Image (tube, rainbow, N blue to C red):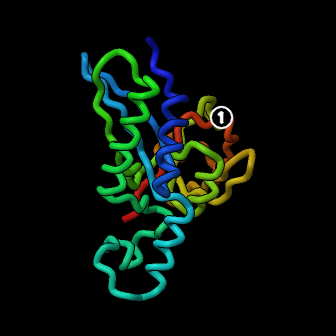
Amino acid sequence: MAVKLDEIRKAAQRVASSLGLDVVDVELATAGRERTLRVLVEKNAEGRAALKAQLASGAENEELPEALREGTLSVEQLSGVTHGDCATLSRDLSVVLDVEDLVPGGEYLLEASSPGLDRKLTKPEDFERFKGSLVKIQTFEPIKNNRHWQGRLTEATGESITIDLGAVKQNSKSRKSGVTTVDIAFSNIEKAQLIPEI
């Protein structure tokens, strides 16, 4: 029986939404007979707005990460999920997965966690949200004879993104391309992720 990740993703989003979370990614990893279903979540827009308000209030709050309080990390870069959020999501989602039999074929381990500072970017909204951040992009088709690009995300439209290559040291292929910015169509992005700046 095949595992239908799209159905699992929809179920995970239903449960996550009820907890004020958004699903970033769902993946099923197998190692021998061991199967691990990973669900990466972050606070939804309202949750991030609440974190911003809490930070803007200026009140001493030891619950907020030190890097956020010091300003070296932005609320947008922070997923904002707690251990409690992950535990609740894991408990509630495991019931839904079992009742709807979305992971057939025996036992599996369910992991719920933050996407981390090097989170994947998968939707146009992700690129819009993280404008100004450092990104690493791999394309399906080469651009200027190169499929791997790193730089600062300066623009994100509905069709493409623009990366400033001067923001990071480039590999030899990127340097030889002779360009300072690169435009990449969304349809040509195979993988994209943030590069942590701490």
Left or right: where does residue 11 sit relative to residue 117? right
Residue furthest top in the image: 1
The one nearer the camera, 149 or 52, is 52
Q: SS for tag 1?
A: helix
What percent of the width, then of the height, locates residue 128? Answer: 64, 57
> Can residue 198 be seen in the rendering of this structure?
yes
Instruction: Quadrant for the N terminus, please.
Output: top left
Q: x%, y% of residue 24?
A: 49, 46
- The reply to whether residue 136 is visible in this rendering is no
Residue type at the position of mark 1: Asn
Q: Residue at x 41, y 49 (%)?
A: 115
Q: Nearer the viewer, residue 10 or 191?
A: 10
x, y percent for residue 42: 45, 54
Residue 28 vs residue 180, the one in the foreground:
28
Residue 137 against residue 102 in the figure, above or below: below
Q: Residue at x 70, y 41 (%)?
A: 185
Q: Quadrant of the C terminus?
A: bottom left
Residue position marked by numbered label 1 in the rendering? 188
